[in-house]
């Protein structure tokens, strides 16, 4: 059976390379990104790679793209709007264990709702901490660390993320 799976993977990889000039994980070869999103109850037209880690209560609106190797932590509640782009490697959290760790377990895990508005672009390898709200049509640059709210139509990037301008559409 293992040999049959390897042959199937090879065949599917060759087809994917030929048609789209890309190589993806085995899970993404045999699943459909739009079906994955539907199974999670995400909005119409949204897509979600097979290798995305989804925890807890995660709500995603319509026509949102969730890239590969993303972590969506909804253990404290996570809401993502319509027409968002969540790039590869993004991590969005709604909990942390900092106080539990430094108090040797005397303090509980901290949870807070995290909210991403409509039309938000989040660049690759960005981390968004628990309790943050990102307003509509905001742009978060690649490799940013977002630990404060981001107003609507604002561009931020860096670690920690700083406002660098307004989104002009």
Image (tube, helix red, strand yellow):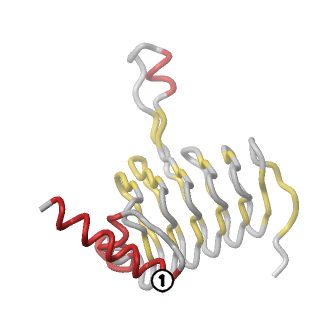
Residue 73 place in picture, x, y as percent: 43, 50
In the displayed structure image, the side of residue 12 where residue 21 appears, left or right:
right
Would you call the spot at circle 1 few (<14 residues within 10 Å), some (14-19), or many (20 or more)? few
Percent coordinates x, y for residue 64 in the rendering: 52, 76
Residue farthest right in this picture: 165
Residue lying at the far left in this picture: please name it.
Answer: 1
Query: How many numbered discs sit on the rendered protein?
Result: 1
Q: Residue furthest top?
A: 104
Q: Residue at x 78, y 56 (%)?
A: 156
For the residue pair 82 and 140, the one nearer the viewer reads as 140
Assign a secondary structure to mark 1: helix
Residue 13 picture location, percent across and down: 39, 73
- Label 1 sits on residue: 18
Q: Nearer the viewer, residue 6 or 115?
A: 6
Q: Residue at x 30, y 69 (%)?
A: 9
Image position, residue 4 (x, y; %): 17, 67
Quadrant of the snapshot with the N terminus: bottom left
Residue at 47% over, 75% down: 61
Name the one closer to the observer, 100 or 5: 5
């Amino acid at each position: 059976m293992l040999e049959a799976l390897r042959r199937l993977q090879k065949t599917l990889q060759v087809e994917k390379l030929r048609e789209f000039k890309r190589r993806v994980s085995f899970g993404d070869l045999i699943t459909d990104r739009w079906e994955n999103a539907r199974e999670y109850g995400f909005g119409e037209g949204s897509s979600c790679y097979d290798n995305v880690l989804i925890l807890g209560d995660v709500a995603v609106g319509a026509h949102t793209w969730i890239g590969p190797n993303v972590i969506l932590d909804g253990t404290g509640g996570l809401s993502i709007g319509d027409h968002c782009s969540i790039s590869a490697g993004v991590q969005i959290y709604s909990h942390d264990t900092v106080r539990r760790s430094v108090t040797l377990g005397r303090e509980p895990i901290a949870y807070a709702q995290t909210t991403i508005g409509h039309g938000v672009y989040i660049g690759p390898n960005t981390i968004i901490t628990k309790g943050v709200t990102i307003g509509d049509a905001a742009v978060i640059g690649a490799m940013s660390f977002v630990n404060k709210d981001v107003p609507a139509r604002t561009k931020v990037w860096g670690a920690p993320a700083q406002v660098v301008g307004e989104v002009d559409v």
